[in-house]
Image (cartoon, rainbow, N blue to C red):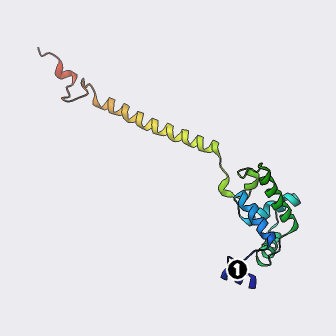
């Protein structure tokens, strides 16, 4: 509890070197530290973190400043990829826990096409109705004469 209080009072205090590695790797991937821990857990164990393990992991990492060995290994792997110049921070596997990064282009294109079709139908329908409503006008510009007014009188 005192670590939490110290962190709240002095957020700029020095972190351990192990936590700094995790923070650097998370910054390289543009994700949060805890998301990096989730990715590291999945990479090491081959499955997602269980809800009970999430609580223990959060407590040991955030409150007690203990970094699991598999998280350090994963952070070093990410930094090595960056040093080699092959790290793609936009790769979907790094954002699997990030809801904001999921996009569905096909849904967006389909929605755009439906809206464009609706607008075209509305404008086209309005033009057709206005043409039919004007009846037999012979001129576009005023004065508007109808065909029966232009007929010769007997």
Task: Between residue 36 and residue 124, name the one nearer to us.
Answer: 36
Residue lying furthest left in this view?
A: 154
Task: Between residue 41 and residue 104, name the one nearer to us.
Answer: 41
- Position of 85 compared to 106: left or right? right
Residue lying furthest bottom in this view?
A: 2
Can residue 19 be seen at all in this image of the molecule?
yes
Q: Identify the residue at horizontal 80%, vertical 50% (top origin).
A: 84
Q: Position of residue 85 (x, y in %)?
A: 76, 49
Q: Which residue is mark 1?
A: 7
Up the image or down, 89 lies above or below 110; here it is below
Q: Quadrant of residue 40?
A: bottom right
Up the image or down, 36 lies above or below 150; here it is below
- Count of numbered tags: 1
Q: Position of residue 86 (x, y in %)?
A: 77, 48
Could you say whether the residue bearing mark 1 is in a helix, strand or loop? helix
Q: Identify the residue at horizontal 77%, vertical 53% (top origin).
A: 82
Q: Identify the residue at horizontal 14%, vertical 15% (top origin).
A: 152
Q: Quadrant of residue 1?
A: bottom right
């Amino acid at each position: 509890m005192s670590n939490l209080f110290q962190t709240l009072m002095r957020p700029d205090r020095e972190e351990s070197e192990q936590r700094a590695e995790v923070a650097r790797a998370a910054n390289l991937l543009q994700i949060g530290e805890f998301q990096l821990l989730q990715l590291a857990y999945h990479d090491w164990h081959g499955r997602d973190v269980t809800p009970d393990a999430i609580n223990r992991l959060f407590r040991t990492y955030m409150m007690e400043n203990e970094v699991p060995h598999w998280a350090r290994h994963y952070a070093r792997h990410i930094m090595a990829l960056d040093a080699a110049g092959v790290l793609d921070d936009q790769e979907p596997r790094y954002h699997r826990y990030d809801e904001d990064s999921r996009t569905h282009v096909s849904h967006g294109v389909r929605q755009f096409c439906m809206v464009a079709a609706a607008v075209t139908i509305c404008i086209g329908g309005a033009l057709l109705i206005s043409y039919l409503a004007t009846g037999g006008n012979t001129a576009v510009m005023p004065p508007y004469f109808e065909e029966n007014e232009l007929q010769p009188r007997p």
